[in-house]
Amino acid sequence: MFSSVSSGTLFGMSVYPVQVEADMSDGMPMFELVGYLAGEVKEARERVRTALRNSGYRLPPKRITVNLSPADRRKKGTSFDLPIAVALLKAMEALPDHCTDGMMITGELSLSGHVKGVRGVLAMVMEAKRNGFRRCIVPMQNVREGSVVQGIEVYGVCSLAQTAALLKGNEFPVIQEIPEEEPENEGKDVRYDFADIRGQKVLKRALEIAVSGNHNILLIGPPGAGKSMAAGCLPGILPCLTKEERMEVTKIYSIAGMLSGTGLVTARPFISPHHSVSAQALAGNGASPGLVSLAHRGVLFLDELPEFNRAALEIMRQPLEEKEIRISRVNGNYVYPADFMLAAAMNPCKCGYYPDLSRCRCSDTQIGAYLSRISRPLLDRIDICVEASRIRMKELKSQKREETSEKVQQRVEAVRNLQRERLKESNIFCNGAMGQKDIARYCILGKSEERLMESAYDRLGLTVRAYHKILRVSRTIADMDGEERIREKHLCEAIGYREIAGIF
Amino acid sequence: MEENTYYNRRNSKDEIRYVGRWESEYPKRLLTISNPPAGIYVKGRLPEEDRLTVGMVGARMCSEYGRSAAREFAGALASAGVQIISGMAKGIDGISQREAIAAGGSTFGVLGCGLDVIYPVQNREIFEKICERGGLISEFSPDTPPIARNFPIRNRIISGLSDILLVIEAGEKSGTGITVTRALEQGKDIYALPGRIYDSLSAGCNRLICQGAGIALSPSEFMKNLEVRYEKLLEKSKINGKFDENKHCVLRTGRNKKNINMLEKKEKVVYSGLDLYPKDLENIALETGMNISEILEILIKLELKGYIREEGKNHYIRF
């Protein structure tokens, strides 16, 4: 007898529907799986056979064929175990014929018949809803992420036997409402608090500006200045994710298999890879999103920037410009979102002490070689460049209470709201994302400000790109001051954060 | 020969000529040193025998202090008609020679490579201009690449061609030290620019002063010392007569002092906290007690007015 069950498979960020067809007919007893399957899908045969037996069902000695359709697209992952088992049960007539209508099923089976979690359940449920399905059966482990989607019933199951019972009864229990509001910023990776850092006013100010306007930032300074520690404070001052953003981020983490039984991700991601990271790990591949996508709507922090592999750094050009990354592989082209704030830290030279000439041991050729490891196009995408200096004893010993991250975060939140409101029409939500047109529209200068920028342009030898960067950053600084007009002091401060020709 | 990016720009070979030790054009000053080159390649002129020559040497990685001192001394000396000898290297050498050319004086570069090789490329414009009033000298044949071991060798020619050696900035152990040793062997006068005892770049100079070198306090002071010893040579040098002590020998850092009254009060506070050594933003904030945005506004305005300069990211110096 023939039967069919709907399921889906991941393809980059999207899910495409797969029909699991099973047929049992007379002939030589065998169990065949077809449909352009990857190794782990072929192995489902053994898992399904054993799981069925251990759940009290014995496969009849018939010629069994399972096909995953469309048969010309590559199927990967372990999420077909449960739909295959259900399709077989239907073909064996152990389950009624129409019990899976309007239903999408996904899940991995263990030999004992238990259902295990799989990747990409959120994306799968979203796709199911889009395609008009009414119900989804997902592993219990993933039920919280699946339930995030409104307007579709999502059932979590623990075992094959439970699934069969559910389908046989055809009476679906009413789903318990999962409280929609997750606690804010749960699971925030807060390594340090601003209150832990003595002094470093410059760094703190620059980081606050960067976060407020979502500007990319580069911290330069001698070893031990506290660059990494300051960057470690970033998660603590990042604004909360908005509802849509949570959805986006959760989808990515679901596909990467990095949700550990939780529902929506509520804290902004903070990704800080080691400098040995490969270009592929940053970019991602057909099977899972890379680090640039995991940092979506959050921060990608690259410590010791010049030590990174050149190819890995160049990977980031496109995502920094287009806010997404396109990857082309044999099996197709994938697009992952990658809208992150780049934070990077580096020493000014190999020994780390330039321009302190009494300590720096590098020749200027060496300094040039060290700095040239970072390409111009990457630097062009960094709005704020700031020096971290060695902390002084006086500050180290000071008993002065430093401001906490929480306070800073509240300010950041307010400034972000301001920007979102203003930039609504341009379809962006922060100053860092302003293009040339938006700058012309939102960064209007008065007469004296105009004059200041003119003299800065000539005297400091600014480029057009640097000019725009300064305007963007000054917009954020003005917003932080609560001023609608950009004043001279805002421009001056922004000029102070430009990257200078002497260094690069 | 393999091309190297550091010197792949080339001068033309056309005007290079060879001057042997037996020829009358060969500099007399070189004849008296212990191992004079058998002959030298020359482009442009050779230093005049009856005009005073001063060798200006110093670190390649120099501080702003060394940079501005080199400019002041080179400018004043060149305007006084003194011929400046140096090694065309990055840092003090190049700065001195550039300034000498700008002041309309004559300066001579002694190279450690062939005369058709431009090294370092940063000084290309000096290579282009130097032959108008001065010249390039090397004992190495054209096409010789800039090999490290050749540079200390040419140092004896720098000191040999100079009547006086003026050391602007030098570490305790440096290439400049080699030139000084050669100059001492050749019996030349040494002057050094004093510096702070904590600065490693001034350590070599201070050591020389400790050992009895002359102290180059200011261009005018230096010129006065020269007048005592080199009256004749200096007299000859002055023939162009355009030298004006008041104009050329006043320290330029003094010039800025007048201008400070033009600044606003807060600008003055920030400005007076700066000097010729780079000071970082954090430190300035700590000393003045102002907040970062306020200080940056003042600093950028001072920079735009030309009072200070950013040296390294967020490090500021007087200009």
Image (cartoon, grey):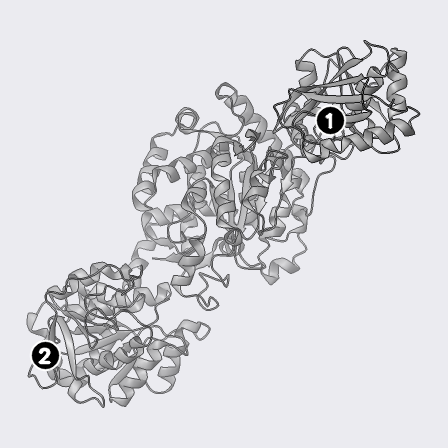
Residue A494: assigned label: none
Residue A138 figure quarter: top right
Q: Is A286 left, or right, of A260 in this rendering?
A: left
Give the percent coordinates (x, y) of residue B196.
42, 73
Which amino acid type is shown beneath numbered disc 2? Glu
In the image shown, does A162 or B6 lie closer to the viewer? A162
Position above or below: B61 against B312: below
User: How busy is the neighbourhood of tag 2: few (under 14 within 10 Å), some, or many (20 plus)?
Assistant: some
Q: Is B140 left, or right, of A282 in this rendering?
A: left
Q: Looking at this rendering, what residue extends furthest in the top direction? A: A98
Give the percent coordinates (x, y) of residue B23.
7, 83
Which residue is identified by label 1? A33
Q: Which residue: 37% across, 87% down?
A: B211
Q: Which chain carries label 2?
A: B
In the image shown, does A347 or B263 lie closer to the viewer? A347
Position above or below: B43 against B189: above
In the image shown, does A413 or B124 lie closer to the viewer? B124
Where's the N terminus of chain A, which quadrant? top right
Q: Is A387 left, or right, of B168 in this rendering?
A: right
Numbered disc 2: secondary structure:
helix
Q: Looking at this rendering, what residue extends furthest in the right direction? A: A56
Report if the CB atoms under discs 1 and 2 are less than 8 Å apart.
no
Rounded to the nearest angstrom, the CA distance separating label 1 from label 2 is 104 Å
Which residue is identified by label 2? B235
- Residue B173 showing in the rendered view: yes
Position above or below: A212 against A152: below
Which amino acid type is shown beneath numbered disc 1? Leu
- Residue B102 showing in the rendered view: no
- Same chain for mark 1 and mark 2? The answer is no
Q: Is A363 left, or right, of A52 in this rendering?
A: left
Which tag is nearer the camera, tag 1 or tag 2?
1
